[in-house]
């Protein structure tokens, strides 16, 4: 247990930051999941895929910028999702 007022304050700050980081990471995972579901749909509309992809890439970039995930992880997510999107849209042979 924290013994000083400063240590108590740090505990409060850490709890707030941890809660916010958890929300941000969960939002990111849900958006990536939504992108994967859009790609796995029976007959996906290209406009829907592009809209979801833009929102997903925005969240991934923001998460990397804020430090929730590393830059390399963000690049890997975007690369894999973009490759899948191109395959579904017929731009690249599987």
Image (tube, rainbow, N blue to C red):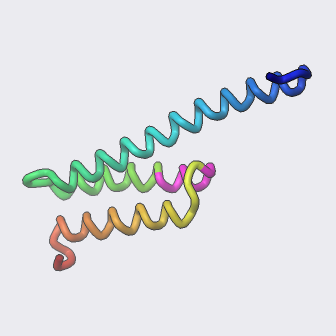
Report the magenta stretch's main SS. helix
Which quadrant does the C terminus fall into? bottom left
Outermost residue on the left side: it is: 42
Q: Nearer the viewer, residue 43 or 2?
A: 2
Q: Position of residue 40 (x, y in %)?
A: 17, 54
Left or right of 43, for residue 40? right
Q: Position of residue 36 (x, y in %)?
A: 26, 53
Q: Is residue 26 above or below residue 42?
A: above
Q: Is residue 9 above or below residue 84?
A: above
Task: Identify the residue at horizontal 91%, vertical 22% (top origin).
Answer: 4
Task: Identify the residue at horizontal 89%, vertical 21% (top origin).
Answer: 3
Q: Is residue 13 above or below residue 81?
A: above
Task: Identify the residue at horizontal 39%, vertical 68% (top origin).
Answer: 79
Q: Is residue 17 above or below residue 25?
A: above
Which quadrant does the N terminus fall into? top right
Q: Nearer the viewer, residue 55 or 2?
A: 2
Residue 64 among those drawn in magenta: yes
Outermost residue on the bottom side: it is: 93
Left or right of 41, for residue 4? right
Q: Nearer the viewer, residue 14 or 47?
A: 14
Residue 53 among those drawn in magenta: no
Q: Which residues are magenta?
A: 60-67
Task: Identify the residue at horizontal 26%, vertical 66% (top origin).
Answer: 84
Left or right of 68, for residue 57? left
> How many badges with numbers are in the image?
0
Q: Position of residue 73 (x, y in %)?
A: 50, 62
């Amino acid at each position: 247990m924290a013994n000083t007022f400063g240590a108590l304050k740090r505990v409060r700050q850490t709890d707030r930051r941890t809660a916010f980081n958890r929300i941000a990471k969960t939002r990111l995972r849900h958006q990536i999941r939504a992108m994967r579901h859009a790609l796995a749909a029976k007959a996906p509309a290209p406009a829907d895929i592009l809209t979801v992809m833009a929102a997903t890439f925005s969240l991934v970039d923001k998460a990397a910028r804020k430090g929730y995930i590393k830059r390399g992880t963000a690049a890997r997510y975007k690369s894999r999702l973009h490759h899948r999107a191109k395959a579904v849209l017929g731009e690249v042979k599987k």
